[in-house]
Image (cartoon, rainbow, N blue to C red):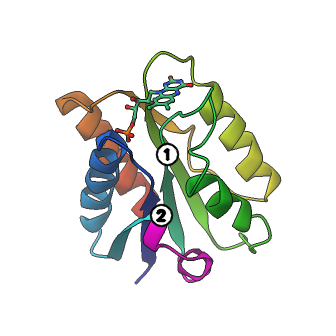
Amino acid sequence: MKNITVVFWSGTGNTEMMANAIAEGAKVSGNSVKVLSVEDATKQDIIDSDLIALGCPSMGAEVLEEDFMEPFVESLSDIDYTDKAVALFGSYDWGDGEWMRDWENRMKDYGVRLIEDGLMIHLTPDDEGTNLCKKLGEKLANA
Ligand SMILES: Cc1cc2nc3c(=O)[nH]c(=O)nc-3n(C[C@H](O)[C@H](O)[C@H](O)COP(=O)(O)O)c2cc1C
C-alpha cells in the first residue's frame, strides 16, 4: 500500500476544497491518504510519503503564501525524490498562472517528478473543478 499525503495552505478555503477533492479521488485506490494543513505538516511527512500533492493559492504578487507554505516548500529542497511522484495544485484569481509555473520549475529543480502540470482552479471549485481535482487524486494514486 502506498502512502499518499496532501499538504495545503488555504486562506479562504478554495485550495482546501481542492485538497479534499484530491484526497477523495486518491482514496478510491484503497491507499492510505492523509490531508494536512501546512501548519500541521512536517518535512518528515513528505519523506515518509510515496505520493504527494502540494496545494497553495497564488498570493502576494504571484508567489506562494509566505509565512507557512514558502518555508515549507523551501524545506523540501534536499529530499530524495527517486521513488516519489508529486502533484501541485491551487486556486487563483486575476493572474495568468505565473506562481504555478515558477513553483513547477522550482520542484523540478529539486528533482521532483511531477505527474502533470499544476492544477489551477479559478477561485472556488465548481462541479467541473471538483471533478478535475478528484481525477488528479486518482492519477496521483496510480502514479
Ligand atoms: C493577499 C492576496 C494576494 C493575492 N495575490 C494573487 C495573485 O498574485 N494572483 C492571483 O491570481 N490571485 C491572487 N490572489 C487571489 C487568490 O489566489 C484567490 O482568492 C484564491 O482563491 C485564494 O485561495 P484560498 O481560498 O485557498 O486562500 C491573492 C489573494 C490575496 C488575499
**In percent of the image, x 57 and y 24: which residue is there?**
97
Density class for disc 1 (Cα within 10 Å; few <14, some 14-19, many ≥20) is many
129 in relation to 26, above or below: above
Density class for disc 2 (Cα within 10 Å; few <14, some 14-19, many ≥20) is some
Q: Would you name the residue on which mark 2 appears?
A: 38
Q: CA distance from mark 2 to mark 1?
A: 9 Å
Left or right side of 83 for 26: left
- Magenta region includes residue 47: yes
Looking at the rendered structure, the secondary structure element under dot 1 is: loop
Left or right side of 109 for 9: left
**In percent of the image, x 40 and y 84: which residue is there?**
1
Q: Amino acid at mark 2?
A: Val
Count of numbered circles in the view:
2
Q: Quadrant of residue 127?
A: top left
Looking at the image, the residue that sits furthest to the left is: 127
Residue stretch in magenta? 39-49
125 in relation to 39, above or below: above
Q: Amino acid at mark 1?
A: Cys
Could you say where residue 62 lies in the image, as x and y percent from the top left? 62, 28
Left or right side of 4 for 105: right
Could you say where residue 96 lies in the image, as x and y percent from the top left? 57, 17
Question: Looking at mark 1, is its residue's CB closer than 8 Å to ligand 1?
Answer: yes
Could you say where residue 110 lies in the image, as x and y percent from the top left? 79, 58
109 in relation to 103, above or below: below
Q: Is residue 76 visible?
A: no
Q: Nearer the viewer, residue 111 or 54?
A: 54
Q: Quadrant of residue 69?
A: bottom right
**In percent of the image, x 59 and y 82: which residue is there?**
44
Q: Would you name the residue on which mark 1 appears?
A: 56
Q: Are marks 2 and 1 in contact (CB under 8 Å)?
A: yes
Question: Looking at mark 2, is its residue's CB closer than 8 Å to ligand 1?
Answer: no
